Structure formats: structure tokens, C-alpha cells
Image: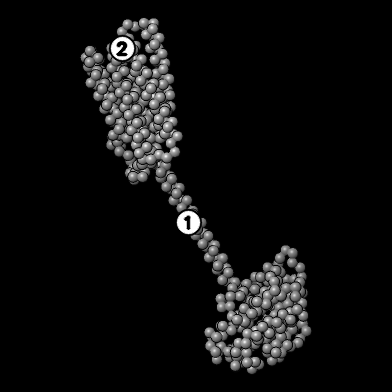
Amino acid sequence: MLNKLIALPFTLNIEEQRQLQKATLEENIARGKLFAKITIGIEVTLASADIVGSLSKAHASFQFSFYFAMYLFMILLNICVLWGGARYDRRKERTDHNLRTYETAFFLYSILFMVWGSVVTLADQRLYGQLMAFVVNVMSISVIFYFNNRRVLFLYCISTFVLFIGLPFVQHSSEVLIGHYVNLTIFLFFSWVASRILYVTYCSNFYSRILLKQSNQRLEDEIKANLSVHEELELANEELQRISLVDALTEIPNRRAFDQRVQALLSAPDSAPSVISIIMLDIDFFKLFNDNYGHAEGDDVITKIAQTIHAATRSFLDIAARMGGEEFVFAAFNTDEQEAIQLGERIRSRILELRLSHEYSAVSPYVTVSLGTATGLVSDPEQFAELMKMADEALYSAKANGRNGLFSMNSPKSRPQ
């Protein structure tokens, strides 16, 4: 059981031991400054009473000069504590050397305080044989300040040695002397137990704060890690969303992106029925191209044509996308039939200007496209879907009319090369 009062119920690493040492010193200094003020007040009162008693000659055997000197010493000692505590508080940088210096100074103060009680108690034996000064000083140091077991035993040994050695010289009654030794032994034991309980409790509270701080730090790190993972997931989702809306080969919008963009424009709060033109495009004789030039060359042709179609967009109201394979779509909002025909012809001409060789085409030595357009007043997705069907039919008509041309569903006409 006594082992629990001596050994701490946990293990601290070197850094934590240093933190405990610093925290204990700061707590002792804070308590010491308050205790010093109280002690100065008490000693000033006793010194004043001593002066009055000496002047009035209250008792012939009373050693006024000795007690006055002891009171004055205690007052000066506690003034030094207040000065040292104020200096410690003002110091911004506290090195390990500074901490050890202040710790040693405070320990020396405690030794002098307890030895002072032993000396005054020895002097009291000549008057009334009391142990009050020693008891009060030992109890004050034991319950007000925090010392490890080695230091508190050193404090007890020094002051007790002075008192126990000196008692036989000033206390001539053997019965009283034996009573003092017995009472002091019991008192010292319980004072030591009280000091150990308080010290172990203080250290346990300190360790609990360390555990709480570590737990909070781990929680903070986990929150930061979760936030980082969440941000990474958001970025990944954004990238996945972007990838899901972009054709992997041509890097222009795919059918899904086309549908979402059209839906967004049609369902905008300020949207109204508008004239929309749709252009469907298809590469002529592309299967023959793939079969004879290979799929790698075919992918290159699709990419170049896709970029040419996408480059024809004029504003955010134009949407170009790859429908799949060699088929593309171009939706132009607020664009009438004539503008759509001109836009389609411009796209067809720019594709011809690429001069992509196609020896197996029946209409041109270069890669060509067929286009079908449809224009109408659209106010909802259903009407847009109908317009898409019309543009698709126009595309088939362009193919049936010899390819490498444009066919408008609203006013049928062909634009050969």
C-alpha cells in the first residue's frame, strides 16, 4: 500500500517528465507567492507583538530579541520568494538551466522554512514546551507544495534532525521529551502520507491532461486525415465526373454530356421556347477506312474530325458531341434553319480541308462527312427528342443522296462537294 504513495501509477517518457517538472515548479511558485504574502502578514504581526511585549516588559524570560530576529529572517525570506516568483513570471524564455536554478532555489526556501520551524520550536521549549512552530511549518510545506518522494524525505530529515538532536538540550523533562518524540513521529508519518496523496493526485491529474491532449491530437489528426481523404475523394469524383462526360478518344463531350447540357438549357428558370437546330454528322465509308488503314489510323481520323466539329462551336449555346463510333451531333440553340445549313457547310468544308486520305471512298479521295439538319421551336425535352429524330432522318437522306453533302429536313436540299 505504501508503495502506491511512493511510485507513480504510470510511466512518463523523458519529455513528459520534463513537462511535469516544469508544471510542478510553476504550480509551486504560484502557490509560494500567495503563501509568502500570508506568511509575511503573520510574521509582521508577531514581530509587532514582540516589539510591544519587549517595550512593555511583559515577561522577563521572554527572548524578544531572538524571536524578533527569527521573524525578521522569515519576512526577508518570503520577500525573496515574491521577488523570485515575479522574476520567473517576467522571463519569456525558460531554458532547462533556468528551470533547475529556480527549482533549486525554491527547494532551498522550503528547507529554510522547515528548519526555521525546528529552531523556533527549540526556543519555545524554554517557555511553554510547544511543538506548534515545527508542526505548522511541516504541515504547510507538506500540503501546499508538491515535491517528489526523494525531496520530501530530504526536507523531513533535515528539519527533524535539527529538532530531534536539539530537544534534549532544551527540554529537561524526560516525560515531555519522550512524548514529543512519539507525537512527532506519528505526526511526521501522517504528514508524509498526506503529502504523498496530494503529490500522486497532482501527477495523476497531470498525466490525465497529457492523455487527453494526446487523444485530442489524435482526434484532430484523424479529422485532418478524414478531411484530406474527403478532399481527395471530391477531386477524384470531380475527375470521374469529368471523365464520364468526355469522350475518351476525342476528348470532346460524349452523349451523356450532350444530354445533360441540353437538359440544363431547356430547364433553366429563365428559359423560353427557342428555335433550335440540330446537325447530325457521319463519316462516309468509315468501315472501309478502318478495314484498309487499320483502327489506329481510324481513331486518328475520328479525333481530328471531332476536334474540327468542336472548334465550330460559337458560344455556350452550341453543343458538339460524339454520339458513338463515327457519328457526331451538333445542337445550336437560337439558330434558325438557314444558319444551321451555313454552319453545317462550314464544318463539312473544314473537314475536307484536313485532306485526310481515303482511297477507298466512293465520293472523294479524302475523308468526307454527311450531315443532316433539323430546325424547330423547342420548349421541352420531348420536342427536342423529336427534333433529334428528324435530324437523324435527314442524315440518312444525305447518305441516300450520295454522301459528302448536307440535307435539311425542313427545306430538303443537298450541298455536294
35 sits to left or right of 162? right
Which image quarter: residue 153?
Answer: top left
> Is residue 174 visible to the viewer in this orientation of the structure?
yes
- Which amino acid does the dot numbered 1 rest on? Ala
Percent coordinates x, y for residue 357 in the rendering: 60, 89
Percent coordinates x, y for residue 304 in the rendering: 60, 81
Which image quarter: residue 149?
Answer: top left
Give the residue pinned by disc 1: 225
Give the residue pinned by disc 2: 128
Q: Residue at x 65, y 86 (%)?
A: 352
Q: Residue at x 53, y 65 (%)?
A: 236
Please report whichever mark, 2 or 1, sits nearer to the chain's N-terminal start.
2
Q: Residue at x 56, y 65 (%)?
A: 238
**Above or below, comparing residue 368 to residue 27 in the picture:** below
Q: CA distance from mark 2 to mark 1?
A: 72 Å
Badge 2 element: loop
Q: Which quadrant is the N terminus positioned in?
A: top left
Which image quarter: residue 300?
Answer: bottom right
- Which amino acid does the dot numbered 2 rest on? Tyr
Q: Residue at x 70, y 82 (%)?
A: 346
Percent coordinates x, y for residue 307 in the rendering: 62, 78
211 sits to left or right of 361? left
**Above or below, comparing residue 270 to residue 87 in the picture:** below
> Is residue 372 visible to the viewer in this orientation of the structure?
no
